[in-house]
Each structure stands twice: as structure tokens, then as C-alpha cells.
Image (spheres, rainbow, N blue to C red):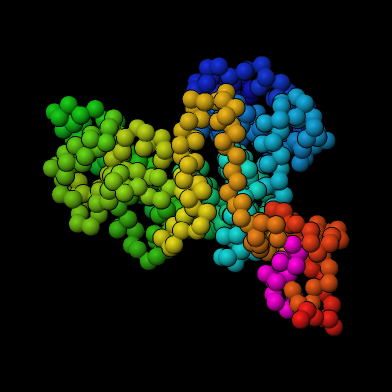
Amino acid sequence: MGIAELIDRVRRYDSAVDAEALKRVYELAVAAHQGQRRASGESYIQHPLAVAEILADLEMDYQTIAAALLHDVVEDTSVTQEQVTELCGEEVARLVDGVTKLTRIPYQSKEDAQVENLRKMFLAMAKDIRVIIIKLADRLHNMRTLGSLPAAKQQAIARETLDIYAPIAHRLGIWKIKWEIEDECLRYLDAGGYHDIIERVAKTRSAREADVNDAIAGLRREFANLKLNAEIQGRPKHFYSIYSKLSTGRDFSTIYDLTAIRIIVDSVKDCYAALGAVHAMWTPLPGRFKDYIAMPKPNMYQSLHTTVIGPTGDALEIQIRTWEMHRTSEYGIAAHWRYKEGGKADQFENKLSWLRALLEWQKDMRDSRVFMENLKLDLFDSQVFVFSPRGDVYSIPAGGTPLDFAYQVHTDVGNHCVGAKINGRIVPLDYQMRNGDICEILVNKSSGRP
């Protein structure tokens, strides 16, 4: 893909995009990465182009596309932040800077609490939701091209991606990225399991596709009789989802979503009309109906789910949704951040509740300065996240000092703290810590606080 194809793709949803400006941004990226190659041997510029293409599929604005083209120039080339600002403006430069800062977050600890803190820190350091989306697209393309790296590095990157990036994509509702990221991670983390699932799915594919096609034909006839306008399609299979279900001990034959249909209609009323038609045609399985329209998932996912005994006597899973619900499901209109396992929501959850509306408004307000100001995410204004020298993440109150950090580590460390280094530099103990600081506490065991 080249810049011309990228511009054409952006024009499909934004006819007013400044093509010349985007070309100038691309030319800066080409010049900056001149002579650089990826591990695969391809020219490095293909990576930022691919990231921009992923974001164009999500219908992101000009500034996000521009920042995607430049997202590695400050980190990996001689181009400075000031040069990006001069050529592209402050907004694009801020996005590039945000991605650069996220790139520098180390990942070491695999303890559950540490991974959770790292996810929180990832969001806390991104003051603009678009920074997170660029970083997710960046990681998705890196996963697509992971095959060129040594096996040990493949495993490390896949584990980091599954621990940090996939849950963030899930919590922001960006299913299109989440599903592919998880499948790519599985390929490297359990190659045997991955290929076993592909093989088992492939063995029954012909029969399942024939069953789905028969069911779709029957639905089309019924909907035509009811004068119900609907798009009916087979639903894609996600290998990681199947793998997760098998990991709980379930038998392959009991995984209903191997044979699945998606029905997309024009209104909520039509959703329930379609559901009535489905249940009139085929017997629903008890306990398998879920109404996520009346009661959306925490990340605002909405659909009707039902499983029926299809025309061949096998279980058939069906999802029914409107076009708006489908776009939300596929492209991730972020809403809430909540523990998937259904535990009590964190205090910051409600601070993300307005993201869904913001991202929906984006398509109509691409040139609005007011909108872009509202995209600032001060998600954690009451806390900051800092690292120990080992890479562990700690949360301390906003305005907290190295001494607060010392007591977070351990009371004994706090009691014997005599000084601190932040990012390798000695600082006073009343220094106000910032997101991403690496704090080393200097202790004197012979002294102690009362």
C-alpha cells in the first residue's frame, strides 16, 4: 500500500481530507526512515503505512492518520518533536509524543496486580484517546509481522500483547482489533493448540458452511414474507475464543459458535421481530438466550443472542443487532472500563462513560477544536503510576512524593528512606512524582523514622 491508496481510503469517509497535507506528512516519514528496514527485510515505511491503514479502516480523523505515519520518527530517527510540530502542527505532534511515551513503558512483571496497574498506567499516560488507538493499531501490525523475529522475542511480545493490549482493546470495545490480536498471540504462545484448532475447525468446515447456507436461505425467505429488511451473514470464527472455551474443559462438539449467523436490521423493533421469526422457525435451546439490547454489556456491546436447533438438527448460534450496534461492536466505540469477570467496578470506570458519545461525534466534528479539546483524557487525576527499578508499577496519590512511594513499597523501606533517585537523578524527598517516573529509594538501615 502507498500513500495514494491510503488517501483514497480516507476519502471514502472524509471527502474533505487535506490530501496534500497528508502527502507532506508521508514524505517526512519516508525521509526520516530512509535506509531503515524491518526484521522482515521490507522498507520500514511500510509499517507506519500499515498502521495508518488500520486506523483508516476505523475511520479515524486526519490528525490520527498523520500521527500514525509519524509515530516512530521521534523514537527511532533523528527527527525531533519540534520538527513534527513545525510541519504538522501541535495536535499531531502531541499525538506522536503520546505514542512515543507509551512505547517507552517497560513490561517486566507478570503478576496479575502488576499487569492491571500497567494497563491503568497505559491509559493514564495517554491524555488523548486517539493515542491509545494508534498504539493498538501499531501493536496489531507488529503482531501480523512477528514471524520475522527470533522465537524467544516472539513469545515475549505475544505475552505482553495478550496481557496488556488485548484487555485494553476489550475494555474500549475495539473488537475488530481485539479478536485479531488474540488470534495472533495464540499462534506464538501455543502453536500446537493454535494449529490443532485450525485443523479441527477445517475438518468440519464444509458441512458447517452448507448448514449455515441452508439456514440463511430459510431466514431470507421468512424475512421476505414478513417484509423485514435484513442483512444475513455467517459470523467469523475467532480461534482464541474457541481455545479459551476448550481450556475450561469443554468438548469441541459443545461449542455452539462454530456454526453462527449474524442478522443486521434497521431498528431495535426489527431486532425483536427477527428474533420472533427465528424462534418460530426453530426451537430455541433453554438458557441460551441473552438480551444485550435491553441490558448492554459494560463496554456498551448490544445484540440479541440465541441458540436454536437449526434445520439439520445441530445447534446454531444467532446474533441479531442494528447497523449502529454492529458498527459499535466492530470498530469500538469506547464506553466503560470494567473488570470482565464481573467484580466491583473501579472508581475510574465512570470517567470513561462519556467516551462512546465522543467517538460517535468524531465522524461529524473532525474539524471542531472544541471536540478535540474534549478528547483530553484526565482519567486518573487523583493518582499517578510510577515504576520501581525492577519494573513493578505502583499507584500513589496525585502530588505524591518519593516518600509516599517508599511506604507503598514497604513500611520498612519508608521508615529507612534517606533519599531518592527519579529516572537516575537525585531529587528532594518532596519532589512531586509524575506518571512513568522510575523511582529508586535510597535507604539507611541504621536510621529509622519514629
Q: Quadrant of residue 426?
A: bottom right
Rendered-image quadrant of the C terminus = bottom right
Q: Main secondary structure of the magenta part?
A: helix
User: In x, y percent, where is residue 320?
Assistant: 28, 40
- Residue at x 25% of width, y 54% of height: 288
In the image, the segment drawn in magenta is: 401-413
Q: Quadrant of residue 72?
A: top right
- Residue at x 28% of width, y 46% of height: 294
- Residue at x 42% of width, y 38% of height: 328
Question: Residue 100 versus residue 210: which sits nearer the camera?
Answer: 100
Q: Is 7 placed above or below 146 here?
A: above
Question: Residue 32 versus residue 251: which sits nearer the camera?
Answer: 32
Rendered-image quadrant of the N terminus = top right
The answer to whether residue 427 shows anywhere in this view is yes
Residue extending farthest front? 450
User: In x, y percent, where is residue 358?
Assistant: 49, 36
User: How many numbered discs?
Assistant: 0
- Residue at x 49% of width, y 41% of height: 355
Q: Quadrant of residue 286?
A: bottom left
Magenta stretch containing residue 400, yes or no?
no
* Residue 173 as seen in the image, left or right of residue 370: left
User: In x, y percent, where is residue 361?
Assistant: 48, 30
Q: Is 16 placed above or below 366 here?
A: above
The answer to whether residue 123 shows anywhere in this view is no
User: In x, y percent, where is residue 20?
Assistant: 66, 16
